[in-house]
Amino acid sequence: MAGQGCQGRAGCRSAGRDAGAGPGARGSFPGRSGPGAPGPPGQSPCAMSGAPGGRRPPFPALPGERVLEEAAGARRRRGNGGGSVPGTLLCTNRRLAFVPGQAPGSRGLLRPEDEVALPCIHKLVAASSFSKPKVLTAASTLKFIPEELAVFCRDFRLLRFSFPENGLAPQAFRVANAIAQAREAAARLGDAADGWASPGEAVPEEEEEEDEGSSTTLLFESLRDWEEELQRLGAAGWRVSAVNERFDMAPSLPQYLWVPSGLLDHDLKRTFGHFQERRVPRLCWHHPGGGHLLRAASFHPASEPGSEDVRCLEELLLGGRGPCVLADTAELPTLADIQLAHLRLRALCLPGAVAEEKWLSALEGTRWLDHVRSCLRKAAEVASLLAGKRCSVILQEPSDRDLNCLLASLVQLLGDPHARSLPGFQSLVQREWVAAGHPFPRRLGLLCQDSPREEAPVFLLFLDCTWQLLWQFPAHFGFTEAFLLALHDSSFSPDCSTFRFSCQRQRGRSSLPRLPSQTYRPMGGWQEPGGHRGHPNPCSFPPVWAWGRRYSRQQREQFRNPAGPPGPAGPPTPSTPAEPCPWGEPRLVLALAKGSLCPHSLPWWSRPPQRPPLWGSPSGSQGTLGGLLGTSCQPPPGLLLPCTAGPCVRLWHRCYLRGLPQEQRGRLAPSLAGLTEELQLLQERLRAWNLRRPH
C-alpha cells in the first residue's frame, strides 16, 4: 500500500521533501505502485484512476460519473470556530463532494453546500505546517503531504478540508493531485460529446420527480412553445416565423422568431444581412397597453440596402406601430467592466482581504453595485416608456447576445407579473438567454481554451439585479432567494444543457451523436428515443430546471415564496391603454439616452430626422420616469419601479459573503438543516465563552 515505508505523517513529509527532483518529486511513496499511484504531470485523472473503470460514487451519480480518488476520514472545517465534521472527501470526474460520516452508505442526495462542480473551482490551495501554501494545478508538483486543502469557488464559496494524522497522508496526497488534474480535464472535455455521458445509465428515482414549476416551464425548442407564449402575450399583429429553422439565416438565433404578421418570410430574408451577426429585430414582449419590446444587433456598418430592402427593414422596425425608440447599451458597463468588477468583488469577499474599517470603501471601489444600479435604472426607463406611451422600443447591442439579454429580461420582470412567478421566470431565462444565444461557456469561463478577455459574468449580474427587485418587492415574486442562489451556483455546472452551450444550434448538434438511451423533457420527464413530443433534436443533458436531480423535495419547497402571488399569471388582462404618443407620426424614430428622447435617423435615411414637439426631454417638469409614464407619475398596476439610490442597492450577502468564516452556513437556510447547524454553532460559541469567563 501507499503508506508502507512511512511512519506516520512526519515520515511521509520527510519522504516528500528528501525526494527532491527524483522519482518522489510528485510525492510518490516507497513501495507505491499500481493504478492508484499519482501519474506524471499532465496525466489526466481518467488515466490516473483507470476511469471509466472507477466505481460509482455513494450518492446519485451524474451520467458517466466515476470516483477518481477519495479520502475517508477527512474533516470539513466550519468557519468562525464552528469545529469540523468528519466524512469522506471524493473527487469524481464531474465534481468534488464531501459525504458526512465515516462510512457513507446512503445514496441520498448530497447537500448543495457539500459539493462543487469541477469547472466552478477557481483555485485549489494545499497547506502544511512544514511548507508554504501551494496553489495546485494539473502541471504543478506537490512535494509535501497536505494537512489542509482550501477550495476557492467561482460562486464565492470557500471550502476547507483537513486531514488528521491517522494514516490519511497517502489519501490526502492522492486526492489533492486528483482534484487539480480532474479540474483541468473537465475544462478540456467541456465541449466534447464523448466522455460525458454513458449509455444505459439508470436515473435515480429522485431525478424522476417532476416539479410543478418544471412541467410548466417552456424551453422554446419547439414551434408549439413559441406559439403558446405569443398567445399568452396577446400580441396581435405578430406571428411565429420558421425562417431560421435550419439555422441558415442566423446561426446564433433560435429556430423560431416573432415577426410582424404583414412581413412574409421571403421579405424577412432580405433584412438579415443588414445587422451584425445577422441578428434581426424580433419581438420580445408585448405590453397589454399596446407597447412592443424588440431586440436586435447593431446595424451592419457596410450595409447599403436597396429600395426593396429598405421597404422590408422599415416594415420590420416600424410597421405602423407608432414611433420607434432605439435604446442602446452605451450607458451600461462593458463586458470588461463587468469582469473586472466581479474579480474585485470576489477578491474582496475572501477572509482577511481588507481591514474591516476599509471594507465599505473597498466595496464601492469594485464598481459592482454601480453596475447593478445602472442596469436597473436603464430597465426602469424602458419599462416606463412601454407602460406610458404606445410605441415600440428596440434594444440594440453590437452582438445582441449579452446586455440585451439582461435588459430584455429586467424589463419583463418589471412589467409582466407572469415573469415574476417561478415557472414564468424559468421560461423567461430560457427565451431571452438560452434560446437567444447567450454564450454561457465563454462568459462564465467554463472552458480552458476560452480567452480570459471573453469572460464576463453578465448572467450573474442579472441574477443580482433580480435579487435587488426581490428584496425591494418581496410580495410580488413567486420565488425566493434560495431559488436565485441555486440558479447562481448551478450556472457553473456543465451537466445541464442550459449553461453548457452557446446557442440553440450548438445544443441541437450535440444531441445527434448522443449515446444515452434517455432524454429529459420537463413536459414529460425522462423519455426513450422517439418520445420527443415534437422536439426534433433533443439534448441528452437535462435543463437546470430539473431541480429534482440535485435538490430534495424539502429543499425545492423553499424555492417558492409563500408570501408571493398565488400562482403563475394567466393571459395578461388589458390594462388602461397607454397614451397615444404626442411625438409625431408613426415613422418617427427616437433614441433613448440618459432618460431623455431625441430624434434619430436610420442609416439609410438621407434627410435629417424630424423634430418632435417634445424632443430632448419628454419628461418635462415631472422628472425622467414621470414624463415617460405620461401625464400621471403613478406607475400603472403591475409595473415595478425600483429605487436605485445609493442605500437602496445592497450587497447580496448570502451569495457573496459565503466564503467568510462568520457567514458560512447552509445556502438554503432557514431550513431545518440550516437552523440546526446554526443552533449547534451558537451552542459551541456559548460553551467556549463560558470556559473563558472568569469564575
Image (tube, rainbow, N blue to C red):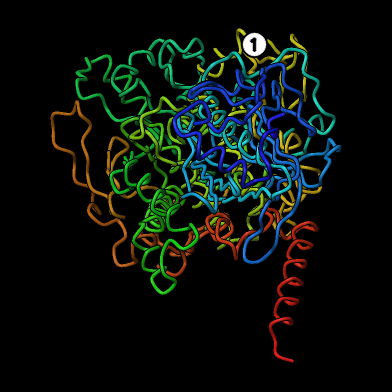
* Residue 62 relative to residue 594: left or right: right
The picture places residue 193, in percent across and down from the top left corner, at: 57, 14
The picture places residue 68, in percent across and down from the top left corner, at: 67, 27
Q: 583 or 482: nearer the eye?
A: 482
Q: Quadrant of residue 358?
A: bottom left
The picture places residue 397, in percent across and down from the top left corner, at: 33, 35
Q: Secondary structure at mark 1?
A: loop
* Residue 366 relative to residue 440: left or right: left
The picture places residue 208, in percent across and down from the top left corner, at: 81, 29
Q: Residue at x 59, y 49 (%)?
A: 148
Q: Is residue 615 above or below residue 168?
A: below
Q: Residue at x 54, y 16 (%)?
A: 192
Q: 332 or 52: nearer the eye?
A: 52
* Residue 432 relative to residue 684: left or right: left
Residue 380 appears in the rendering: no
* Residue 261 relative to residue 518: left or right: left
- Amino acid at pointer 1: Arg
Q: Quadrant of residue 548?
A: top right
Q: The C terminus is located in which quarter?
A: bottom right
* Label 1 sits on residue: 514
